[in-house]
Amino acid sequence: MAERAKYGAAAMAGITGKLPVPFPREMGPNCLKYLEEYVASGLTADITGRFEAAFARELGVKHCIATPGCTPALAMLASAFSFAPGDEIIVSPITDYGTLQGLIRENYIPVFADTDPGCINISARGIEPKITDRTRAILVVHKTGLMCDMEGINTLAARHGLIVYEDACQAVYSEWKGRFAGTFGLAAGFSFDSEKTMGSDVGGCVVTNDDELAERLRFVGLSRGAAMKPHFGRLHVVPGYAYRMPNCTAAICLGQLEIIREQVVRIDRAARLLNKLVARIPGIFPLKIPDQQNVWSCWMYGIRIDPAQFRCTPEEFADQLSQAGIPGAGMGKYYLMPAALTFLDENARNKVYPYSMPPASREYRYSEENCPQAKALLDSFIRWSTLCAKYEPEHCEMAAAIIEEVAEKNRR
């Protein structure tokens, strides 16, 4: 049998190096207090509701619907939109399966817009050529905590009458012109999984200012699509889900919420310093921070290398960084979704529903050739997801020194 993927602390177990790692996590001082409160209440305290209200208040939105994780949050959104099978959702090619799972389960067809050269996120420029008469929404992903140009994307979407929503799972408290990631579209999904910036044991949520959508999310996503009929009981009028955040998870999230803002300040400071130091090394290119982004909640740090300047491959370069002391440094080729989700192309070629016609209105193919700019970036992209609030300036200097040492050792 194939080795199963691991997540959270289990995925980082055994990762060592000269730099800090997120685990064991810094925990909010009141996490245990909220957990004890829930137990002492005999399981009656609504800690989940308190967390929802607190997070909504923090982001300045009307509604927060808490979920067991980020994948359920985005899946719940997909189910709440009620598009037709075969309808198209434009999405970033550089992301994680969790972004797409809900679209696939609802029988929508993902269409991947290519990134701009050297960029990890999509923009209006790459989205516009992908719009068809079957396009219903644009799902943007703020990968690595760097934010997409939501102003340009929203302008394009408005011109075509499309919904825009955000995967902000790696961008909690990132800010664009003082406005938080997740507040630019109709709705957004967040992650509080243990390895993410605001880590609980697991967890996620959806935020929105739309009252009707919020009620639909709670009905379909939390109440399993069940309505109460007098003298009968539950009528399941739509196929729904029980994507409810457990109160114990909410207790940890509530505690972590009390320390996250200061942590993000430290992460932003460290990531910007590291970018400045790394940019001085010939042949090494940090991801560009948009000028309009004034807070970078950097969950994953990454660099591109110019393979023409080095005698080793990018994968060998990453291995040497890991051996030299950068914990978890490695390639991220598996983030290229058109290539990583092999079942999509298999289903499309075999015209498995919804790729049959109807409901599909044309043929689809999925491969790395769909998005050459995204592929080019990931072919030379080295990342590590251990940059955290524990980083001090000396850690940034150490990381840059390690990168420079490996670069000079392999320079042509």
Image (spheres, rainbow, N blue to C red):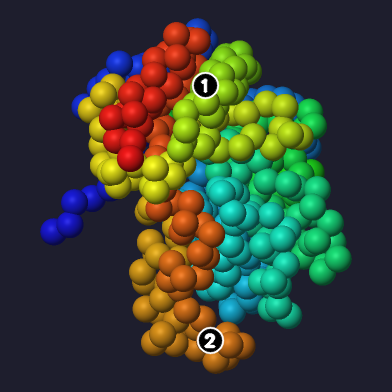
Q: Which amino acid does label 1 sit on?
A: Leu
What residue is shown at x 37% (from left), y 78% (from top)? Answer: 346
Residue for point 71% across, 78% down: 132
Between residues 138 and 358, which one lies in front from this camera angle?
A: 138
- Side of 30 where 80 appears, left or right: right
Q: What residue type is labelled 2?
A: Glu
Q: Going by the image, does 245 lie left or right of 346?
A: right
Q: Residue 277 carries which label?
A: 1
Q: Mark 2 points at which residue?
A: 363
36 relative to 201, above or below:
above
In the rendered view, tell whether residue 316 sits above or below residue 388. Answer: below
Proximity of marks 1 and 2: CB atoms separated by less than 8 Å: no
Residue at 77% of width from left, 65% of height from top? 162
> Can residue 109 be seen?
yes
Q: How crowded is mark 1: few (under 14 residues within 10 Å), some or many (20 or more)?
A: some
Which badge, 1 or 2, is on the more N-terminal residue? 1
Question: How far from the left and from the top, in percent, is residue 67?
Answer: 54, 42
Q: Nearer the viewer, residue 86 or 329?
A: 329
Of the 4 image quadrants, the one containing the C terminus is: top left
Examine the rendering and report whether any part of residue 36 can be seen.
no
Q: Say the numbered circle drawn on residue 364.
A: none
Q: Where is residue 9 in the image (x, y as percent from the top left)?
A: 32, 30
Specify the farthest residue to the bottom. 357
